[in-house]
Image (cartoon, grey):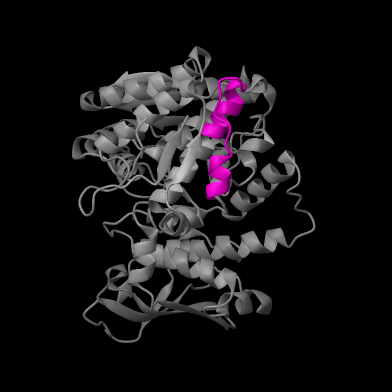
Amino acid sequence: MRASAFDAHYPDATGLAAAGIVHRGPKMDSRHRINASVSPKGSLETLSQREVQQLSEVGAGSLYTLFRQCALAILNTGARTDNAKTILESYQDFEVRLHQQDRGVRLELLNAPADAFVDGEMIASTREMLFSALRDIVYTQSELDSLRIDLSTSQGITDYLFHLLRNARTLRPGVEPKMVVCWGGHSISVEEYKYTKKVGHELGLRKLDICTGCGPGVMKGPMKGATIAHSKQRLVGGRYLGLSEPGIIAAETPNPIVNELVILPDIEKRLEAFVRVGHGIVIFPGGAGTAEEFLYLLGILMHPDNKELPFPVILTGPRSAAPYLEQLHAFVGATLGEAAQSHYRIIIDDPVEVARQMTHGLKEVRQFRRERHDAFHFNWLLRIEESFQRPFDPTHTNMASLQLSRDLAPHQLAANLRRAFSGIVAGNVKDKGIRLIEQYGPYEIHGEASVMRPLDELLWAFVDQHRMKLPGGTPYVPCYRLVS
């Protein structure tokens, strides 16, 4: 086999949009840096002295380090790189200083990317997302310190996620199912990107909202198409929800169309948020990250307790992407079996049909939840096993210890395949994963031949199609090696 190739309470959007900027002059060097002071007006509640202290420990506190990384990613929106390590190293002199004031908090930004500003004033969408990051990071830590949080059980983890999403005002009780999650790669062709916009446009014409991973590529295209459609329908209040997590946000910086950004603590909470908040999922072409999401979803839908639960899933792409979709379909059949393939439909080059089928599927979701008195805004009835919720740390030891065998139950094999792809994503784009690969070499992934062979073929297809990283720059070097 070849050596193979992936928190204060939430201020409302209106209040954040009114946030004031006090600019300290256009101090921009040749590397395009700027200093500024940013304050929300009247909507961001004051932080406790302890929270301010945690976020003010420049260079020392873990909470400060986390917020600094997320803030830099948000300010760097639009950068053409998917390497978190490169972004962090390019702005080593960037600092965020948090000041408590009687009227709220103020962020002092030093050596910030100048592209986040226009004539010395921060772009409104960037400002909103910056304070969303502050909200989520502080509240996440506050919840972890709370006695009501129990992360030792599956139900406790889901309850914790519910509190995080509720604090972010993501949950809208009483609104009928219309949140469509769109998954796919950040590194896609121009034709594939245009297709995602067409699908988003058709979804928007049917007054559906869009949720993505909030980055570029497939995470931006559907939102862009939906904004035009919502405008045509004179729809006010269209939602463009972006769900991210600290490890990925620097590599997939939020696109400016996102009007609701939520940063979850880890990839597992992010994935669960997608399926708890979303009512249906459209999957476009992508790479290792998309495969990770797809396998997570299949593993959940194949659980016996979810057998009767409607959850529309559509794989789609332009005609040129047909071989990719067929290969992904074949991989699922070869590893998880025909039962897994029954949980989704494939629609080639037909945005209208995608939107029609999704709309039909959402009607079934609405009827099902009404009959069982389940909430529209949070999918409580969906059974997610603890093995899908526990954070997976992609160290070399953990990657080598994964069991990839057809002897496992299909949903358990899906869980382990998801972890394998999660490690590849970390080695490709996350700062910690990239540094581990530089220090110890490629991950080794072990498994039986019947699983590793189709996995090897799928991964090499991702490499050949430039789905592992953005085109241009240095050629992709696999961060893994398959062993059977």
153 left or right of 4 in image: right
* Viewer-side residue, 448 vs 369: 448
Residue 6 appears in view: no
Task: Please name the residue shown 56% across and 20% down the image.
Answer: 406
Vertical comparison of 178 with 169: above or below: above
47 left or right of 337 in image: right
Residue 140 appears in view: yes
* Residue at far top of view: 338
- Tell me the quarter of the picture where residue 108 sits: bottom left
Task: Please name the residue shown 68% across and 49% down the image.
Answer: 160
Vertical comparison of 323 with 141: above or below: above
* Viewer-side residue, 19 vs 53: 53
Measured as percent of width and height from the top left, residue 205 is found at 33, 32
Measured as percent of width and height from the top left, residue 8 is found at 60, 66
Measured as percent of width and height from the top left, residue 259 is found at 41, 53
Is residue 432 shown in magenta? no
